[in-house]
Amino acid sequence: MTTTPTPDFIGRTPVHMAEMTVPPSAAYLVDLPDLTAETLAVDPLPRAFTIPASWYTDPGYHEADQHVIFAQTWQYVGHMDQFKQPGDAVYTHVAGNPILVIYDPEAGQVIRAFYNVCLHRAGPLTVRGDKRKVIQCGYHGWTYFLNGMLRGVPDWDRVELFNKEDYSLRPVNVSVWQGLIFVNLSPNPTPIETVFAGIEKRIAPMRLDTKRFYRRDEYELACNWKVYMDNYLEGYHIPIVHPDLNRILDYRQYVTETAPHYSLQTSPFQDGDNVYSSLGGDGSGAFYYTVFPNFMLNIVPGRLQTNIVVPLAADRCQVIFDYFYDEHVLANEDAILEEIRYSDMVQQEDVEICEQVQRGLKSRVYDQGRFSVKREAGVYHFQNLLKQCYRAELVEDGTALTEDQGRKTNVESISVAADD
Ligand code: FES
Ligand SMILES: [Fe+2]
């Protein structure tokens, strides 16, 4: 029996072909507690308050952050050293979306990224095959070429009004900076070179693209992602929380600098050998970069450690550490394992304090605090960038705020040395 499609059906545009309609992000900010012109204002550091406790505890902010922050910024997925063969892939999530990143050197575009969502009925995709790699859905077996074009559709012979071309995987923007790979779900992302401007020159002659991947460690924390970021962004807690680290860093010379999209904490080491000098570097000091919103580069000679902070719920986040070393350091495995053990010890101290802070933020007595001008410029800078993101959405939406409702300082020009 043959059926004639109704005129209605012929005229219908498949949902995925229609202009992708993402609800305006500002919609997620409406009705959130404590989101006012007052709390969004950017005051000078000596007079500024920290962001309200509800921004760390309310589930509405977790949802809003996914759309307003994480779906609009570059998110780290890995390093070029992790890709060797065509079809090598990384499976990850960005702002709650499953993402597939593929190495495809034969087709010109070396790294490709797609939403890891099959166009049939939203199944999960995996790269398969020995010689000729294909992307295959793990639900009903549709296959796609590495460039995302639909390749094979089993048992499809009586389907009407179906164009294979309309069912290519949805691509995601991908960029590589110094060998590090990032994806961005925004259709119009800020160029990655703009975000990282100045870092390459500052860390020279060290380079990050020649580093070799060693291993990944993951931690799950009972705190909001912003609690972890705040904590990372200041050395103020080092003497109390990390007594051991305090003995090797020269805390008096700890300096925080800021740039439009990131901040940098630097500290020379105390004289003498330490866990880092045994990696073969000159032991001269450390660069701690925080790239907004959730990515860190911890650089000492011979070694790179990246951190990414992934929000899981209002009161839960995952922190992923990737360890990279210079080729010549890899031979010294004892030094590497000792350095990782040391890093894990410092991380456990941070986990404990962050989880306690989350409980403090949820208590009935705490709302907003203040900043040390000398020691907490990095936290202030991060919180101002966060406010900027919220404000930009609301201003664009035009309903809640106007640009001049918040007092503003130039958040790009903060630079505080600890000895000022
Ligand atoms: S959902 Fe992918 S083949 Fe059915
Ligand atoms: Fe710490």
Image (cartoon, rainbow, N blue to C red):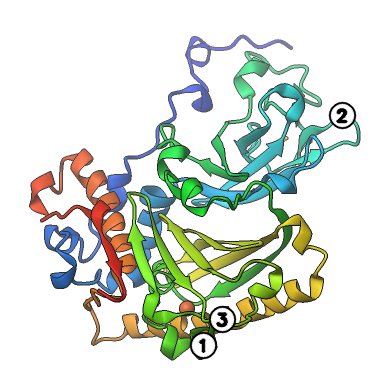
Q: Which mark is residue 346?
A: 3
| Sequence-earlier tag: 1 or 2 | 2
Marks 2 & 3, CB-CB < 8 Å contact: no
Compare residues 340 and 76 and report the one nearer the observer: 340
Who is closer to the viewer here, 316 or 202?
202
Mark 1 residue CB less than 8 A from any atom of ligand 2 = no
Q: Check disc 1 and report its element: helix, strand or loop.
A: helix
Image quarter of residue 382 = bottom left
In which quarter of the view is residue 363 placed? bottom left
Please state, as top left, top right, bottom left or bottom right, where the C terminus lies in the image.
bottom left
- Residue at 67% x, 27% y: name it: 148
Sequence-first disc among 1 and 3: 1
Q: Is residue 311 left or right of residue 98?
A: left
Q: Which residue is mark 2?
A: 132
Amino acid at circle 3: Val
Dot in front, 1 or 3:
1
Residue visible at 61% across and 9% down in the picture: 4
What's the CA distance linking mark 2 and mark 3?
A: 45 Å
Amino acid type, callout 1? Arg
Find out if the beta carbon at label 3 lies less than 8 Å from the nearest ligand 2 atom: yes
| Callouts 1 and 3 close, C-beta under 8 Å | no
Secondary structure beneath dot 3 equals helix
**What residue sits right under mark 1 in the picture?**
247
**Residue 358 visible in the current orientation:** no
